Image (tube, rainbow, N blue to C red):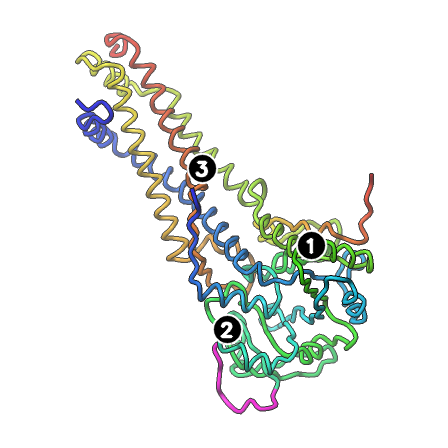
Amino acid sequence: MNKIFNPLLFEYSLKSLKRRGSKNIFISIIFIILIFLLSCAFMISNSLKFELFTTLSSLPDIIVQKIKAGRQYDIEKDRIEKILQIPGVSNVIDRVWGYYYYQRAGVNFSVVGLKEFEENYKKNFDSIADAIDFEDFEKKPLMIIGSGVKKILEKNYYKNYFNFVKPNGDFKRVYIKGVFKGESELETNDIILLDEKIAREIFGMPKNKSTDLVVKVANPLEVKTVASKIKLLYPDTRVITKEDLKISYQNIFDYKSGIFLALFIVAVFTFFIIVYDKTSGLTSEEKREIGILKALGWRIEDILTQKFYEAFIISLSSFLIGVILALFYVYFLNAPLIRDIFSGYSVLKPSFNLPFVFDFQTFFLIFFTTVPIYIAACIIPSWRAATLEADEVIR
Amino acid sequence: MKTHKSLKAKEAILKREIVKLSTLTDLAVSTETRAVRYRSVADFFSVFNEDPELLEYFPTTFVYAPCDNLRKNPSRIEIE
């Protein structure tokens, strides 16, 4: 007889599971739902993190913001010259960007002003946006918008252009030249990219000020030093380096609080109810079955092996089904209900096409915190019954 | 055990180009508040803008942890 795997015992275990079909199906369903929810949460968070880290290298080395009473204010452009004098700084660019509230749709668009928009457009934009050619665009203000912005504008009957309302109440018509490619939806869904001069008009921002400054440092190892020098030079600023952004991205999800803590508590609580039910003792029918098997000559090891097979079949199959369902749900169906937890009350929601990330460590963690505990919970009461004499158990 | 990640090279290049052009941080997954949309560069005021005693009430602040950069506030007083 094969000592490692006994096919006859395995077959007996399968038939035993079938005999108590409804109870085992119920336990399997609960197990599958738990594994499914945990897997979905981890998959989505890992994919979002991966998406963030994909673009980290393209971000600026240093961002300088002016902060007053905890609020960000426009920063003076004069500061650029002094920052340029710091050794190691290769370039300082002022950024004009902000939020434009479109009242009718109740939506905030992120408006970004680009320097030399037309020149940049002719060079780069074919690769990043799908161009729209409706009419003659010569000498007209143009913009490139995200797909979420396009949907909102179309809903509000804006097909080729949009009328921004300036702070003085005047309108500024800007024509839609292109839409960012669908693959970049997670980054560009709410973005409107246009010329910096138009952005200044829309925000009513004076020419001597900008939203913030972006500093490029030639040697990446000197970024921290340059950042501390900028901070000393202008104490009313907040200086954010790429390293700070990396830490921010790493800590985007805190598994010890928020939705994840709520999910883990519920999952652990439900799981331990199942385990408690199993360890609190066998039913009289199960005890009698063990007694009869012992009377027929089964050894304790055979009974425990049979119980192990039963628990292993339920837990492993539930785990695998839960994980496979989660993979299908997140990466094929784009997580229909759960994605609303991650997008909240936003009006502009991207399609949630996430990059595929399968973290073995996470799944091993889920596996080893569920399957062995469930198997142990099934074996221990059976061991207690199996160590007694047959007549005692049957009685 | 390594993590298996998959993003087409073309897509990754596209995303990097766009972020390099716009220089904006974070993803546009949630746009309900700037403390979440631009989480990494948000100021303290964006979290407590209505009232300093009013706790945040957006559902996504329950999902996304606040950024460490919020503590980088020039007007903050350190008590030793």
In terms of secondary structure, where does tag 3 sit? helix
Answer yes or no: do the residues labelled 3 and 1 have beta carbons within 8 Å? no
**Closer to the camera, A78 or A28?**
A78
Q: Is residue A8 magenta?
A: no
Label 1: element kind: helix
**Does A179 sit above or below residue B45?**
below
Disc 2: host chain? A
Quickly name the residue at label 2: A128
- Residue A270: image x %, image y %? 44, 34
State which region is magenta: A129-140
A390 relative to A352 in the view: left or right: left
A139 falls in the magenta region: yes
Q: Disc 3 and disc 1: Cα gap in Å?
A: 34 Å
Circle 3 or circle 1, nearest the eye = 3
| Mark 1 on the same chain as mark 2 | no
- The kind of residue tagged 2 is Ile
Q: Main secondary structure of the magenta part?
A: loop
Q: Which mark is residue B47?
A: 1
> Which amino acid is tagged 3?
Leu
Q: CA distance from mark 1 to mark 2?
A: 33 Å
Q: Residues within 10 Å of mark 1 (few under 14, many from 20)?
A: many
State the residue at coordinates (66%, 77%): A115
A273 shown above or below B59: above
Chain letter for mark 3: A
Same subunit, tags 3 and 1: no
Residue at label 3? A365
